[in-house]
Structures are given as structure tokens and as C-alpha cells.
Amino acid sequence: MSDFTVACDWYERLFESPPDVLPTEEEAIWRPAASASIYITVDRARAGRGLLTLAVKNLDDQRVSLARRGLPVDEATEANGMRTLILTDPDGNSIKLFEDPG
């Protein structure tokens, strides 16, 4: 990411919480599940080239929730027919959500 403050605000809206850990002034970690962590850091040379894919319980509920938080999404259908939601953070990194079939 290129601007930590802007990115941190955006990810706080995405995860509906502040970071769980702030290791340094330019790093943040969210722990959305017991076995998952999302780490963001300032890296101006690589900002905008990331992809994060998250499995969610209900894609339609997530669309509504993301819109409520001011996070616009695009919907796509993968080659295998799976619907996905795609968000783009302030640096252009892609966050893809799909409905967990399990």
C-alpha cells in the first residue's frame, strides 16, 4: 500500500473493526478467524499488485453489508460458474469474495 492511513481506514471498513495488531507504524494485522490473518504494510514499489481471496458464508448478505459500509463491489462469474464479488482497495489491490460451498 502507498498510504497507510487511507488503507487502514478502508480495511477497517472491510473487516468492520480496527486492526488486531499494529506491529509498527506502517503495518496492521486483522485476524478475521482463528486460523486466518490478513497483513497489510506500506510498500510503495508493489502497491496495487495484490490479490486477496476470502470465502464467506453468504455472498448476497456480504454484498448488502459491503454496500452499507460504503465499499462498492463488482460481481463476476468464474469459468466454473461460481459467482464472486470483487472489491478494489485504494491502491488497486483486488479482494475477491466467494461463497464457501462447505
Image (cartoon, rainbow, N blue to C red):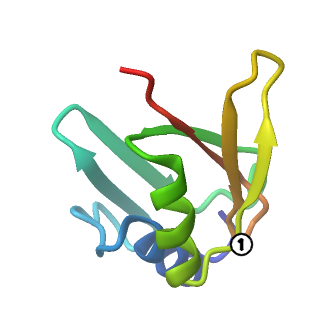
**Hey, which quadrant is residue 70 in on the image?**
bottom right
Residue type (three-letter) at the residue carrying disc 1: Pro
Is residue 7 rendered to the left or right of residue 84? left
The mark tally for this picture is 1
Question: In screen coordinates, is 65 left or right of 28?
Answer: right
Image point (67%, 49%), residue name: 85
Residue sitting at x 54%, y 76%: 10
Which residue: 71% across, 72% down?
A: 90
Q: Is residue 102 visible?
A: yes
* Residue designated by label 1: 90
Picture coordinates of residue 34, whole percent (x, y): 16, 38
Say whether residue 41 is visible: no
Q: Splitting the image into 4 quarters, where does residue 92 fall?
A: bottom right
Quadrant occupied by the C terminus: top left
Q: Is residue 78 above or below residue 30?
A: above
Q: Residue at x 53, y 70 (%)?
A: 64
From the viewer's perspective, tell me whether residue 21 is left or right of residue 86.
left
Q: Is residue 88 above or below residue 52?
A: below
Residue 49, percent from left and from top: 78, 46
Query: Is 45 left or right of 62, judged from the image as shown?
Result: right
| Residue 62 x, y percent position in the rendering | 48, 59
- Residue at the extreme top of the image, as rendered: 80
Which secondary structure, mark 1? Answer: loop
Crowd class of label 1 (few under 14; some 14 to 19; many from 20; radius 10 Å)? some
Residue 49 versus residue 12 in the image, above or below: above
Front residue of this view, candidates 3 and 58: 58
Q: Residue furthest left?
A: 34
